[in-house]
Image (cartoon, helix red, strand yellow):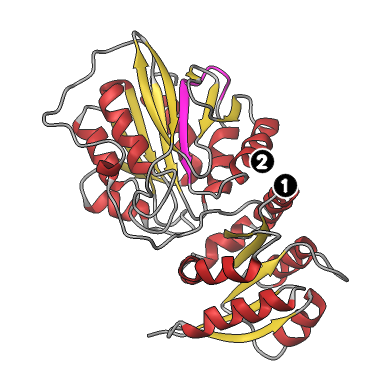
Amino acid sequence: MKTINVMVVDDSAVVRKVVGAILESAPDIHLLHAVSDPLLAIERMKQQWPDVIVLDVEMPRMDGITFLKRIMAERPTPVVICSTLTEKGAETTMAALAAGAVSIITKPKLGLKDFLNESADELVAAVRAASHVNLRRLAVRAPSTAAPAVAAVAAKLSADAVLPAAVETRIPLATTERVVAIGTSTGGTLALEEVLTALPRVTPGIVIVQHMPEKFTAAFAERLNKLCQVEVKEARHGDRVHPGRALIAPGGRHMLLRRDGANYHVDVIDGPLVNRHRPSVDVLFRSVARQAGANALGIIMTGMGDDGASGLLEMRKAGARTVAQDEESCVVYGMPKEAVKRGAVEKSVPLQAIGREILQQLGLR
């Protein structure tokens, strides 16, 4: 078993103590250092460079964003952001993701010790996931964006827990309205940025699940909306899926596609974690398979785990076209790999080609 050497950088002594103890309790994780600010971290890193860094973003002397940019310029390293669950914290975390961080762990302002203890499995899973990132892709991304996704470790449920499997497959009637469904996780924030910024305003409606904690998806959507020709927004229950719009499932809620006549809308609902995630890609993809069938294109991109693999297979069986991001361009080749193994993928392409695939397969190029 390979040991993951981790450094914790946080100005809170409580956070350092609790996070350090949680990490040390995992048999495959070794806590190298727990320091109060980036300047101390830089000194310790001269002695031994960590495999993963757990980093606060609001600290004295040097803020976490500046430190993160320095790391990515000098020696790209997987960084898990430990961020306050507030609107300001979400905005700061978006900057951290843009600077190269790979995932997010949220922390409240109150009840911190109890919260961290209750989230021990989540923290350990996030660090393990970060240790598996493709460092070559991380280096290419810096100082651009990287990925989100907190890997929770509750009991693993399938999409049946939210949307029961159909007794028989029913192929939806054809319509002129087309839908693109995208699922991604670790590495997905930059991947989505690259795909969406390449699309023209006439692109068919897009529905997206990006594994990300509550409150962070709104800031992420706002950031993309400023960069893209298409409108990008955090989905609300009942939103219309139409050309020129991309809807991102809100953190902490599942999103399903619903057809009304020849038009499509989304339902945003509560429900249990599916594949240990909420929102779940499998839940979205299953709903797209049922409601859109051959009118849809399914795309699975970089991410840890297998969420979306089963749903993409359902989409393919319902007549949808299916595409996966290839291994070389993924930060983590987990979700696409599982989808390929299950026969859910028609073709795998590099990240930079996914925008072109959307336009070609939907007859726009």
* Residue that sits furthest to the right in the current view: 61
Q: Is residue 91 left or right of residue 51?
A: right
Q: Is residue 148 above or below residue 1?
A: above
The residue drawn where x is 37% and y is 60% is 154
Residue displayed at 78% across by 85% down: 43
- For marks 1 and 2, give the CA distance: 6 Å
Q: Residue 252: image x %, image y %?
A: 50, 44
Helix, strand or loop at label 1? It is helix
Above/below status of 230 relative to 142: above
Q: Which residues are magenta?
A: 200-210
Residue 172 is marked as none
* Amino acid found under the numbered disc labelled 2: Ala
The mark that comes first in sequence, 1 or 2, is 1
Write down the quadrant of residue 64 in the picture: bottom right
Residue 363 image offset from top left, x and y in percent: 39, 19
Front-lying residue, 158 or 53: 158
Q: Which residue is mark 1?
A: 91
The reply to whether the C-beta atoms of the residues labelled 1 and 2 are less than 8 Å apart is yes
258 or 272, which lies in front?
272
Q: Residue at left 73%, top 87%?
A: 44
Q: Is residue 318 visible?
A: yes
Nearer the observer, 133 or 304: 304
The numbered disc on residue 219 is 2
Residue type (three-letter) at the residue carrying disc 1? Glu
Q: Tell whether position 352 is magenta.
A: no
Residue 307 at x, y percent in the picture: 35, 50
Location of the C terminus (image quadrant): top left
Left or right: 306, with 351 as reference point: left
Secondary structure of residue under mark 2: helix
Q: Residue furthest bottom?
A: 47
Circle 2: is it few (<14), some (14-19), or many (20+) Cα within 10 Å? many
Residue 172, x across and y down, in percent: 23, 18
